[in-house]
Image: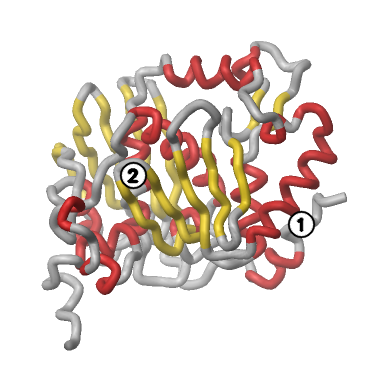
Amino acid sequence: MAIPPLHQHPTAARRRCTGESHQALQTLPPADQAPEFIPAASSTVQARFESDIALRAASIGGISPHPLGIVALHPTPDRLTLRLLNEPYVISHWAQTLLPTTDPDTSPPVDAVSGVAGLRYRLGANTVHLHRPGTPARVDLTGFNPRWWQRVARSLTELHLDTAAFTRPDWTDAEHAIHDHVAGRPHDPRIGSALLRRIRATAGPGRANGTDLWTTSLGGIQWTLETTDGPLCTDILPLLSQPPTGPGWQLTAHQCRCPHGGDFSCTAYLDAGAGQTVYYTNLHWGRTEPRHQFAELNRTAFRFLP
């Protein structure tokens, strides 16, 4: 039987946020509630891991047709599975950006770690399993050859020798310092986790995408979600607010230039509670193709390797 149009089917909103298939959502057990429901991370530890990963991976910029290079994802309360674009340049970016290395000569210690503090990995047959030692936090990466990830990891190990923190079985002192520092900030990691679990909603109708995510503390705690060629406001804002698909954030201000943004961007502010604001903007650059050729990006994906 044909699936009804996206906006009419009960799984449509979740599929728009996650890229999951209708068939997969129909097989969810009753414990996962309605097919349009997107579960939140069940613990602050899991939420912080997802949030830290999202903030780092967002630096990929506008060189992927998919937000952050994520083709689809599957959220459960205690785990998040991300299917990445099967292109070497995407996997190289994720590995280089996430795998933590330390610089013992940097002071203060909170500036001595690049990558996601405490992140470790193990390879499966078709999956890279990410975790933090001593915690139940789990994020799985799929959709590509894990040997690409291992190739980057081995090269980073050679480049950084004793400072490749991700080769250690436990946390380094510098990783503990930056993790404790970040944990002490007022930014709520549940917001970063919620945004990652809905990141596919930022994909626009074209073949170009530039989704970015960052936090600021000037004038209050703000999470900025920026797209360069995102969807219509009517398509994305309900997915960032209205339950059961949305996290329940309240839209407090909105200026819309859809569907013809021209030189003007769309902006929206959402109250995420506890003094936290999510600022969404679509810059309406009007690109129809990524700015770089995939073939060239893939050719140079491992250029730093020895």
Q: Identify the element where label 1 is drawn.
A: loop
Q: Position of residue 170 (x, y in %)?
A: 63, 25
The correct choice, above or below, for 64 with respect to 168 in the image is below
Nearest to the observer: residue 305 or residue 128: 128
Nearest to the observer: residue 187 or residue 232: 187
Q: Position of residue 129 (x, y in %)?
A: 54, 48
Q: Identify the element where label 2 is drawn.
A: helix
Residue visible at 18% across and 39% down? 249
Q: Which residue is mark 2?
A: 195
Nearest to the observer: residue 118 or residue 134: 134
Residue 5 located left or right of residue 85: left
Give amino acid for label 1. Phe
Residue 238 visible, this orientation? no
Picture quadrant of residue 297? bottom right
Residue 59 located left or right of residue 295: left
Residue visible at 40% across and 62% down? 72
Q: Which residue is mark 1?
A: 302
View extreme (bottom): residue: 1
Graded by Cα atoms within 10 Å as few (under 14), some (14 to 19) or many (20 or more), the crowding at tag 2 reads many
Q: Earlier in the sequence, mark 2 or mark 1?
A: 2
Residue visible at 23% across and 61% down? 28
Residue 175 visible, this orientation? yes
View extreme (top): residue: 108
Residue visible at 24% across and 56% down? 236
